[in-house]
């Protein structure tokens, strides 16, 4: 494997010697197994990582798994066979990674978990570059408890079943509201982190809960599902953001528009710019330096008061 890599470097050096562009020389070859494009946040994250790779002259081998773990496992094996210098893996679900991570480790290729975590022996990967999803859930719960003085019946739109983002965001929120006897989760179901999933599941919540009249608030594990739910709430003849409070996570441009329009009430930002710390970690490990096991990337909670200004900044509109 490493022989192949040396050959590539020798080839690139020859090209430079022959007067070819410096851009043709890749500083590192990195494989990136991305989950898919289920949400606005995911699309921004992909674009940001690709742009960072280009800026650094990294040859990024990108693979879109279309939400399937089996595609991610195939992609990682293909990166190993190509002898890449490092792998970025955004794991769609938490479990089932031990074998393929061991294969990468045995090949001497560092794996950086990007955005989501895995339930596996930490010695099998270099580091995780991600926010603390439990903390995000807790922040959402604390905001809602303060906003409603601890009196609120909530419906919850969960993310992809089995993903660390859904498991931990549920846990963090649940931990906080369990301290308030008059707060409870009426219904909780996955909308798979998509706008259409959020709309569909919210429609069923509204039907089951007296046309929505029993619901004080919606906690959505991402903005896209919240935006789908906004549509469902309007179609049911209620006012999102007023009749039903909405708190979600990501901080995508569209949620700032919705907040500025009074249709949602709070969003916790998830930083999509994870490429720089991930590439730095691989470079550091190639240089024999210590890398922490978790590089955190948490963001703040935004409210409607700054939403119009944030929307302008983020969308350029
Ligand atoms: O893993 C992070 C989550 O995945 C984001 O909140 C969501 O938008 C994405 O699909």
Image: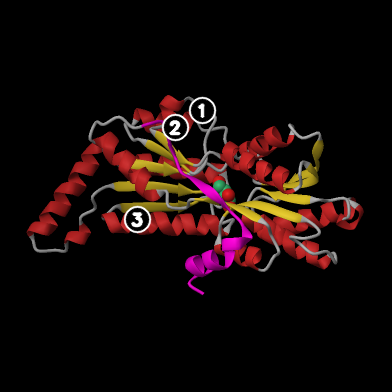
Q: Closer to the N terminus: mark 3 or mark 1? A: 3
172 left or right, relative to 19: right
Helix or strand or loop: what does disc 1 sit on? Answer: loop
Q: Residue at x 48, y 41 (%)?
A: 130
In the picture, the disc for residue 188 is none
Q: Nearer the viewer, mark 3 or mark 1?
A: 3
Q: Is residue 36 located in the magenta-colored stretch of the structure?
A: no
Q: Is residue 311 located in the magenta-colored stretch of the structure?
A: yes
Q: Residue at x 78, y 56 (%)?
A: 244
Can the viewer see residue 194 in this picture?
no
CB under 8 Å between discs 2 and 3: no
Callout 3: CB less than 8 Å from ligand 1: no
Helix or strand or loop: what does disc 3 sit on? Answer: helix
Residue 32 percent coordinates (x, y): 41, 48
Q: Nearer the viewer, mark 2 or mark 3?
A: 3
Q: Residue at x 30, y 48 (%)?
A: 29
Residue 173 percent coordinates (x, y): 67, 39
Above or below for 96 versus 36: above
In the picture, the disc for residue 101 is 2
Between the residue at mark 3 and the residue at mark 1, the CA separation in whole angstroms equals 28 Å
CB under 8 Å between discs 1 and 2: yes
Q: Which residue is mark 1?
A: 120
Badge 3 crowding class, 10 Å Cα cut-off, few under 14, some 14 to 19, many 20 or more, is: some
Q: Nearer the viewer, residue 89 or 210?
A: 210
Badge 1 crowding class, 10 Å Cα cut-off, few under 14, some 14 to 19, many 20 or more, is: some
Q: Closer to the N terminus: mark 2 or mark 3? A: 3
Badge 2 crowding class, 10 Å Cα cut-off, few under 14, some 14 to 19, many 20 or more, is: many
Question: Magenta part of the protein: which range?
Answer: 292-317
Q: Residue at x 61, y 53 (%)?
A: 267
Above or below for 194 versus 146: below
Q: Which residue is mark 3?
A: 52
Can the viewer see residue 135 in this picture?
yes
């Amino acid at each position: 494997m490493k022989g192949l890599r040396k050959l590539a470097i020798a080839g690139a050096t020859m090209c430079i010697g022959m007067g070819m562009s410096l851009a043709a020389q890749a500083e590192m070859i990195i494989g990136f197994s991305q989950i898919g494009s289920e949400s606005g946040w995911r699309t921004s994250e992909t674009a940001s990582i690709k742009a960072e790779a280009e800026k650094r002259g990294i040859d990024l081998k990108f693979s879109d798994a279309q939400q399937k773990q089996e595609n991610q496992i195939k992609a990682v094996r293909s990166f190993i066979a190509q002898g890449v210098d490092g792998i970025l893996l955004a794991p769609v679900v938490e479990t089932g990674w031990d074998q393929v991570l061991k294969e990468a480790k045995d090949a001497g290729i560092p794996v950086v978990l990007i955005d989501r975590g895995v339930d596996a022996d930490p010695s099998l990967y270099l580091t995780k570059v991600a926010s603390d999803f439990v903390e995000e859930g807790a922040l959402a719960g604390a905001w809602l408890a303060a906003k409603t003085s601890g009196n609120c019946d909530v419906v919850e739109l969960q993310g992809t079943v089995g993903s660390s983002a859904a498991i931990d965001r549920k846990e963090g929120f649940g931990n906080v509201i369990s301290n308030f006897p008059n707060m409870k989760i009426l219904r909780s179901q996955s909308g798979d982190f998509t706008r259409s999933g959020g709309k569909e599941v919210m429609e069923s919540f509204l039907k089951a809960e007296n046309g929505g009249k029993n619901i004080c608030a919606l906690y959505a594990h991402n903005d896209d599902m919240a935006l789908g739910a906004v549509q469902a709430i309007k179609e049911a003849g209620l006012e999102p953001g007023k009749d039903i409070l909405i708190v979600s996570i990501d901080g995508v441009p569209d949620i700032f528009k919705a907040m500025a329009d009074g249709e949602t009430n709070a969003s916790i930002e998830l930083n999509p710019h994870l490429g720089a710390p991930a590439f730095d970690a691989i470079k550091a490990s190639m240089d024999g330096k210590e890398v922490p096991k978790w590089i955190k990337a948490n963001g703040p909670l935004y409210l409607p008061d700054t939403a119009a200004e944030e929307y302008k900044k983020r969308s350029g509109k």
